[in-house]
Image (spheres, grey):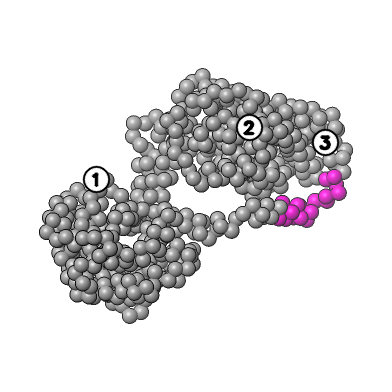
């Protein structure tokens, strides 16, 4: 049969259909022949990794009738994957599929096909939820289906009532245009096609069909519905949110958040008093704090060298320190921590280190940062308890007039505990013979998005394990992380001590410094403003006021100066590094964002 002769290709997605596939194909051929010439249609059995006799029966049907074709897959591709594979090989210009159980009354087939074949519509779909149909919907199917379609209509702004009805037709060129953006390959596939077709302003027709369920559904009402829910959120972000977030919107939003934060502060403190406190600070300790903070940067470069070395790449500390300077400067200039990915661009552009390795090394570094912050704060608490100096601190935290400090400490403890638990679970999975990550994810969902999440976590676990498996490397990276954050805390303590009216014992000053810096940096993780400006100061001030007798004016003034010193050192180092390495920050942000979107494959040297 020549490709030109076929106008309509009907695909039957089949998974373990040995009991029905023969009668389904016969009924399909008869229904098509009732309104189409015999030589203009074909029926394709898209057999998806069956483990029953469906493949053998499909081969027999294809051998007996030239209008029938059989596509076999040794592994399950998923409903959407099997359909896409068959549609690519189909000869028709009108592409049709429906469920092999023939739950939809076949008297609607002509209306479905002709809606697209006539050129009146680009996409056609049957519906069990609009007037004019008879659909026997059992409660266990009807309630989840109605809820799911409501979510799709609400979040994805769809005009359709029934997205999952297995009775659809597409114009070949239109489907070819849409499928490049469709990411799911299982149950959410046809929903995503319909959503993207509407967003692209293609003509979509939904018409009522009579529908009777045949047997038990193959959709797991817990696992697959949960998975499709995650796909709804993913598609909502891609088609509804992400296109609207450009650099101007991000910068404007971040700036507004900072302005609002400052405006709210004026309601409970006097800005003039804060400026007076800042002006009265001793400049000597402030200058020393800048030098102390500067000492942490070569340590950052050395730590990054050790991480990259375990991932298979050897580089000099000087170059890597410059790369870290540039990426952290990017975080100050651009919102949403866009500077994090800049480092991957710099090492790729200047040292040909693959993007996946650059992203992986950054992820491992972040794990050590989070664990170190938590460990330092916990160690200080234990030290205070052991030396009997914890009484005043306990009174400050638990006192009724220190609710804000109590909440801040609780947040820090919860985040720290969650970080430790997550890393322990990831490393345990990496060491285990069983694939604990994939087992846990697939219990919740078996769709392509779940597979993607499992793959990302597995890769991350492997990267952490690459460093953790070498005891010496783990010790070096851990020790350098302790020194880096110790200098960060010392910087804040020197700044705080420079302000008049700060008279705290050394243990209390240390405790406040560790807690304030830890919670302040955790607040900066939220990508709400460039460099966390406003967020760091707010968290730092809340904790200082909550844990000590220091007032808001002094606490906020110290937080502003501390953050300003660190940002000034970062920007100065970043500008110098950009000149030395000939790197454009805007180009680096754009290129690194594109690299993340492309999600390049890991090279052999990355494993």
Q: Which mark is residue 199?
A: none
Which image quadrant is residue 492 in? top right
**Residue drawn 34% across and 74% down?**
118
Of circles 1 and 3, which is in front?
1
* x, y percent for residue 258: 72, 51
Q: Quadrant of the C terminus?
A: top left
Q: Which residues are magenta?
A: 256-275
Real-space Cα distance between discs 2 and 3?
Answer: 34 Å
Between 166 and 534, the one lying in front of the other is 166
* x, y percent for residue 491: 73, 31
Between 228 and 553, the one lying in front of the other is 228
Which mark is first along the chain, 1 or 2? 1
Q: Which mark is residue 323?
A: 2
Between 74 and 132, the one lying in front of the other is 74
**Residue drawn 36% across and 66% down?**
171
Residue under pointer 3: 499
Residue under pointer 1: 74
Circles 2 and 1 in contact, beta carbons < 8 Å: no
Secondary structure category for the residue under label 3? loop
Q: Quadrant of the N terminus?
A: bottom left
């Amino acid at each position: 049969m020549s490709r030109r002769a076929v106008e309509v290709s009907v695909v039957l997605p089949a998974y373990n259909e040995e009991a029905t596939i023969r009668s389904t194909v016969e009924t399909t051929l008869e229904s098509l022949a009732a309104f189409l010439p015999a030589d203009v249609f074909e029926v394709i059995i898209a057999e998806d990794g069956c483990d029953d006799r469906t493949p053998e029966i499909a081969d027999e049907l294809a051998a007996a009738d030239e209008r029938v074709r059989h596509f076999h897959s040794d592994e399950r591709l998923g409903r959407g994957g099997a359909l896409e594979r068959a549609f690519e090989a189909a000869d028709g210009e009108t592409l049709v599929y429906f469920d092999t159980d023939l739950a939809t009354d076949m008297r609607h087939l002509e209306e479905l096909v002709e809606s697209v074949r006539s050129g009146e519509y680009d996409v056609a779909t049957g519906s069990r939820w609009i007037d004019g149909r008879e659909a026997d919907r059992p409660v266990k199917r009807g309630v989840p289906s109605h809820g799911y379609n409501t979510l799709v209509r609400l979040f994805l702004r769809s005009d359709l009532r029934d997205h999952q009805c297995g009775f659809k037709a597409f114009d070949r060129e239109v489907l070819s245009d849409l499928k490049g953006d469709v990411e799911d390959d299982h149950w959410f596939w046809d929903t995503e096609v319909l959503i993207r077709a509407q967003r692209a302003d293609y003509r979509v027709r939904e018409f009522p069909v009579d529908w009777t369920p045949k047997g038990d559904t193959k959709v797991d009402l817990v696992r697959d519905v949960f998975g499709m829910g995650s796909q709804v959120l993913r598609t909502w972000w891609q088609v509804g949110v992400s296109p609207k977030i450009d650099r101007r919107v991000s910068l404007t939003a971040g700036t507004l958040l900072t302005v609002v934060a400052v405006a709210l502060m004026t309601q409970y403190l006097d800005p003039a008093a804060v400026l007076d406190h800042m002006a009265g600070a001793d400049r000597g300790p402030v200058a020393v704090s800048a030098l102390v903070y500067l000492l942490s940067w070569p340590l950052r470069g050395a730590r990054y060298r050790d991480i990259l070395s375990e991932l298979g790449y050897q580089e000099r500390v000087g170059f890597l320190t410059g790369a870290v300077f540039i990426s952290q400067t990017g975080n100050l200039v651009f919102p949403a921590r866009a500077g994090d990915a800049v480092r991957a661009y710099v090492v790729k552009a200047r040292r040909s280190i693959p993007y996946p390795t650059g992203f992986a090394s950054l992820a491992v570094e972040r794990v050590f940062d989070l664990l170190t912050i938590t460990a330092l704060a916990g160690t200080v608490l234990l030290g205070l308890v052991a030396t009997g100096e914890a009484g005043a601190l306990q009174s400050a935290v638990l006192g009724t007039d220190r609710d804000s400090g109590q909440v801040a400490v609780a947040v820090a403890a919860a985040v720290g505990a969650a970080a430790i638990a997550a890393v322990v679970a990831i490393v345990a999975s990496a060491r285990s013979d069983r694939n604990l990550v994939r087992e846990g994810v697939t219990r919740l969902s078996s769709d392509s998005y779940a597979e993607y999440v499992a793959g990302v976590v597995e890769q991350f676990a492997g990267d952490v394990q690459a460093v953790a498996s070498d005891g010496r490397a783990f010790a070096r990276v851990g020790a350098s992380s302790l020194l880096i954050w110790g200098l960060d805390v010392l910087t804040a303590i020197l700044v705080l001590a420079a302000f008049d009216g700060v008279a705290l014992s050394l243990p209390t000053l240390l405790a406040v410094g560790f807690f304030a810096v830890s919670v302040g940096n955790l607040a900066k993780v939220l990508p709400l403003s460039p460099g966390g400006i406003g967020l760091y100061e707010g968290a730092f001030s809340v904790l200082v006021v909550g844990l000590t007798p220091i007032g808001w004016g002094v606490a906020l003034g110290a937080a502003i100066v501390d953050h300003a010193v660190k940002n000034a050192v970062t920007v100065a180092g970043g500008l110098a590094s950009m000149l030395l390495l000939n790197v454009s920050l805007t180009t680096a942000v754009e290129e690194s964002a594109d690299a993340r979107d492309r999600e390049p494959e890991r090279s052999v040297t990355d494993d």
